Image (cartoon, rainbow, N blue to C red):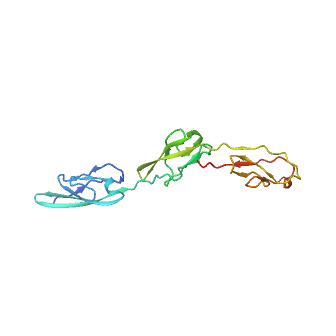
């Protein structure tokens, strides 16, 4: 009679799994199919993600039989980092993001395990960060370089006090080219409308974006 073929369960695997040798009874048969050698070595990294049929064929007493099995290879999570800068040393800490949410981040004291990157701790230069995530039992990681540039040193030239009947005052800051904000009585280019402002003290903010 033809031999009874039993293929031992295997998988699921990951798209980056190492080659694995499949087993079946009776021993001594041959394998065929996608990404598998005749000796039964199945290579998930060659196949990639998907479902792949393999066939095991054995002969006993001149009679041949075969059986098939479907092997599942799960895809790797997409760990690509999407907001890697550049930043300035004066920038606030920023939450880095990856295509696949979750996972853990690593690289140095300038990044937390949840992905908060602190430019002021990193300092000027190029800094490596790695995002690692596991999905469906498959782990993958991506590494990128985050560049931190020197943040601008900003100052506001002294102004005031003003009187309620003063004409429009043009405030100035260093370096030039920044944007003013802070209250309804100042324009984005630094015009302070003293005649429109009730008596009092007003905070203004001067913001400069570095181009280095």
**Where residue 170 sits: x, y (%)?**
78, 51
51 shown above or below 137? below
**Quadrant of the snapshot with the N terminus:** bottom left
- The foreground one among 10 and 14 is 14
Residue 114 in sight: no
Left or right: where does residue 158 sit relative to residue 9?
right
- Residue shown at the point (51%, 39%) measured from the top left: 108
Q: Nearer the viewer, residue 96 or 7?
A: 96
Residue 185 position in % (x across, y down): 80, 54
Q: Is residue 92 left or right of residue 162?
A: left
In the depicted view, which residue is nearer to us: 107 or 170? 170
Residue shown at 42%/49% (left/top)? 140
Q: Position of residue 133 (x, y in %)?
A: 46, 49
Foreground residue among 154 and 144: 154
Can you name the residue that lies furthest to the front here?
176
Image quarter for residue 168?
bottom right
Measured as percent of width and height from the top left, residue 196 is found at 85, 55
Q: Residue furthest right?
A: 165
Horizontally, is 166 left or right of 104 in the view? right
Residue at the image point whose x is 62% and y is 48% from the top: 210
Residue found farthest to the left: 62
């Amino acid at each position: 009679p033809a031999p009874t073929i039993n293929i031992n369960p295997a998988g699921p695997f990951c798209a980056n799994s190492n080659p694995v040798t499949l087993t079946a009874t009776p021993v001594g048969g041959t394998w065929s199919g996608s990404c598998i050698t005749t000796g039964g070595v199945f290579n998930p990294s060659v196949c990639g993600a998907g479902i792949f049929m393999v066939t095991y064929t054995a002969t006993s007493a001149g009679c041949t039989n075969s059986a098939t099995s479907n092997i599942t290879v799960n895809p790797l999570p997409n760990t690509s980092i999407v907001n890697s800068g550049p930043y300035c040393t004066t920038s606030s800490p920023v939450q880095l993001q990856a295509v696949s949410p979750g996972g853990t981040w690593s690289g140095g004291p300038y990044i937390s395990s949840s992905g908060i990157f602190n430019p002021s701790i990193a300092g000027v230069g190029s800094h490596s960060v790695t995002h690692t995530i596991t999905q469906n039992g498959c782990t993958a990681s991506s590494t990128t370089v985050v560049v931190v540039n020197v943040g601008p040193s900003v100052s506001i030239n002294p102004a005031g006090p003003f009187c309620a009947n003063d004409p429009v005052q043009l405030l100035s800051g260093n370096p030039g080219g920044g944007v003013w904000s802070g209250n309804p009585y100042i324009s984005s280019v630094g015009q302070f409308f003293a005649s429109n402002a009730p008596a009092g003290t007003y905070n203004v903010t001067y913001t400069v974006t570095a181009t280095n």
